Image (cartoon, grey):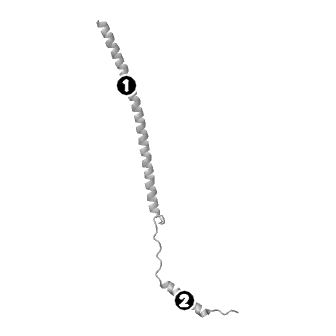
């Protein structure tokens, strides 16, 4: 049988020294949590979700105002076109009336 170079008594002593040396050393600091690693509280999540919902509602309100404004502009353009058509028709009637008046007067 082979002879062990280290006796079991020496092995126990070496392990005890290594254990004490490991405990006596400065502890390795844990890495600081990054924002993605931090756990959100329920209240914070609720608050943020309400803020997101408010933003979505505000965006929808803005979209609605844009749509209403676009409809008013279209209606306004149609009314302007109708107004211009009426003015042109009225001016045509006035010119014809003046021409007819001038023919009668002569």
Instruction: Kindly identify which residue carries mark 1.
Output: 84
Give the quadrant of the N terminus. bottom right
Q: Using the image, determine if residue 16 lies above or below residue 61.
A: below
Q: Residue at 42% across / 39% down in the picture?
A: 68
The kind of secondary structure element at disc 1 is: helix
Within-10-Å neighbours for mark 1: few <14, some 14–19, many 20+: few
Determine which of the numbered discs, if any, sits on residue 52 in the image. none
**Which is nearer the N-term, disc 1 or disc 2?**
2
Q: Residue at 45% across / 50% down in the picture?
A: 56
Q: Residue at 37% across / 20% down in the picture?
A: 89
Within-10-Å neighbours for mark 2: few <14, some 14–19, many 20+: few
Q: Nearer the viewer, residue 70 or 64?
A: 70
Q: Using the image, determine if residue 88 lies above or below residue 64.
A: above
The image shows a total of numbered marks equal to 2
Q: Residue at 42% across / 48% down in the picture?
A: 58
Q: Using the image, determine if residue 1 lies above or below residue 93.
A: below
Task: Provide residue 87's location: percent of width, then percent of height.
Answer: 35, 22
How far is mark 1 from mark 2, CA to CA? 104 Å
Q: Nearer the viewer, residue 78 or 43?
A: 78
Labelled pair 1, 2 in contact (Cβ < 8 Å): no
Outermost residue, left direction?
Answer: 105
The kind of secondary structure element at disc 2 is: helix
Determine which of the numbered discs, if any, sits on residue 16 in the image. 2
Q: Using the image, determine if residue 106 lies above or below residue 11.
A: above
Task: Provide residue 36's location: percent of width, then percent of height.
Answer: 48, 64
Task: Provide residue 7's location: percent of width, then percent of height.
Answer: 61, 93
Nearest-to-viewer mark from 1 and 2:
2
Task: Provide residue 10's location: percent of width, then percent of height.
Answer: 58, 92
Give the quadrant of the C terminus. top left
Outermost residue, top direction?
Answer: 106
């Amino acid at each position: 049988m082979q002879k062990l170079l280290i006796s079991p008594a020496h092995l126990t002593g070496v392990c005890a020294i290594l254990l004490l040396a490991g405990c006596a050393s400065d502890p390795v600091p844990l890495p600081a949590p990054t924002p993605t690693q931090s756990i959100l509280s329920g209240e914070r999540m609720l608050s943020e979700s309400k803020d997101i919902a408010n933003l979505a509602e505000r965006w929808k309100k803005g979209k609605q105002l844009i749509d209403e404004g676009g409809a008013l502009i279209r209606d306004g353009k149609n009314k302007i076109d109708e107004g211009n058509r009426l003015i042109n028709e009225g001016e045509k009637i006035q010119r014809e009336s003046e021409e007819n008046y001038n023919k009668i007067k002569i």
